[in-house]
């Protein structure tokens, strides 16, 4: 990788109304609003106005079994499963697009895919942005990779460790008719990295102005035991308020099958429940 460019998913920087030169785009963003930006839909920052950068590529290929027997793919498939639409964009161009669309917003979210597979370009981007204006930068990551320089530049870490139900299998692929190269054994080996998760937590403890969340996607009560026994008992420094339960699903119909499990468990354990506002209000389409 290089620090001169970033591989971005088709949405790239979104939602936006101006290009890197400051010229108005011909069409409104997918939100339907005549302005740039959206709301962070999940976790501790839910409801905060933000601009997103979506990177391309992921080291996992998550797909979940739903209660009705269907399979739910990662909700950003063009950034993870099929990256043929990825764009190789110069860091300076990305910076200009962001600055031309921030308006009064002060929050940038870097998502994926998995941003930590290309840390060098993101380090350059964030440093360039913060040199021009104060900016709160969050990253959405699966918590399997750690890069000290990139971590130093991030203000908020939304870490989503993957449970067993996320592991891709050939049976799941048959149901979704998705064709991707993957190795289930490798996904099982990679998805849980306690040492990396502890590094993120320790970093935030050492720097009080930084924060994190451990956001788990759930759809069944058995997964709550997995969260506690496979993850939380092996980690230190977290508080109940740092643990976020989010219902599985990338459509309103899928969320109806899973959300009450997450609501009940959050109340019982004193953890947070996370909505998925982008699905509730925009239907989960790309670019919102």
Image: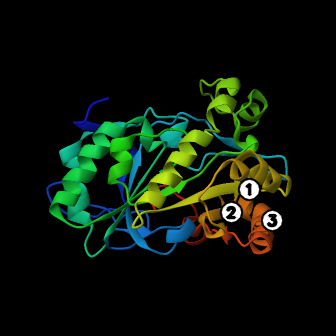
Circles 1 and 3, Cβ within 8 Å, touching? The answer is yes
Report x, y in % for residue 57.
46, 36
Mark 3 vs mark 2: give the one in front: 2
Res. 88 visible in picture: no
Q: CA distance from mark 3 to mark 2?
A: 9 Å
Query: What is the secondary structure assignment of the residue under circle 3?
Result: helix
Q: Is residue 217 left or right of residue 18?
A: right
Identify residue for label 1: 218
Q: In front: 195, or 225?
A: 195
Q: How many marks?
A: 3
Q: CA distance from mark 1 to mark 2?
A: 7 Å
Q: From the viewer's perspective, is residue 234 above or below residue 58?
A: below
Identify residue for label 2: 245
> Which mark identifies residue 261?
3
Report x, y in % for residue 255.
72, 63
Q: CA distance from mark 1 to mark 3?
A: 8 Å
Q: Residue at x 62, y 47 (%)?
A: 161
Q: In front: 55, or 28?
A: 55
């Amino acid at each position: 990788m290089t620090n001169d460019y970033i591989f971005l998913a088709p949405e790239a920087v979104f939602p936006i109304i101006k290009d890197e030169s400051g010229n108005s785009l011909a069409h409104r963003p997918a939100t339907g609003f005549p302005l740039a930006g959206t709301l962070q839909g999940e976790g501790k920052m839910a409801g905060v106005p933000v601009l997103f950068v979506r990177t391309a590529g992921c080291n996992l290929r998550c797909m979940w079994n739903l209660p009705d027997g269907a399979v739910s793919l990662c909700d950003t498939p063009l950034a993870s499963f099929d990256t043929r639409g990825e764009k190789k964009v110069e860091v300076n161009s990305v910076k200009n697009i962001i600055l031309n669309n921030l308006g009064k917003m002060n929050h940038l979210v870097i998502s994926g895919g998995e941003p930590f597979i290309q840390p060098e370009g993101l380090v350059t981007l964030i440093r360039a942005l913060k040199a021009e204006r104060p900016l709160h930068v969050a990253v959405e990551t699966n918590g399997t990779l750690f890069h000290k320089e990139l971590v130093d530049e991030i203000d908020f870490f939304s870490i989503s460790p993957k449970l067993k139900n996320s592991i891709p299998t050939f049976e799941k692929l048959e149901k979704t008719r998705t064709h991707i190269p993957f190795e289930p054994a490798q996904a099982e080996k990679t998805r849980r990295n306690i040492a990396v998760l502890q590094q993120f937590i320790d970093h935030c403890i050492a720097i009080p102005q930084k924060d994190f969340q451990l956001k788990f996607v759930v759809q069944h009560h058995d997964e709550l035991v997995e969260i506690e026994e496979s993850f939380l008992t092996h980690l230190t420094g977290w508080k109940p308020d740092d643990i976020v339960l989010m219902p599985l699903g990338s459509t309103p119909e899928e969320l109806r099958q899973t959300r009450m499990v997450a609501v009940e468990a959050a109340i019982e354990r004193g953890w947070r429940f996370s909505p998925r506002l982008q699905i509730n209000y925009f239907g989960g389409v790309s670019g919102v």
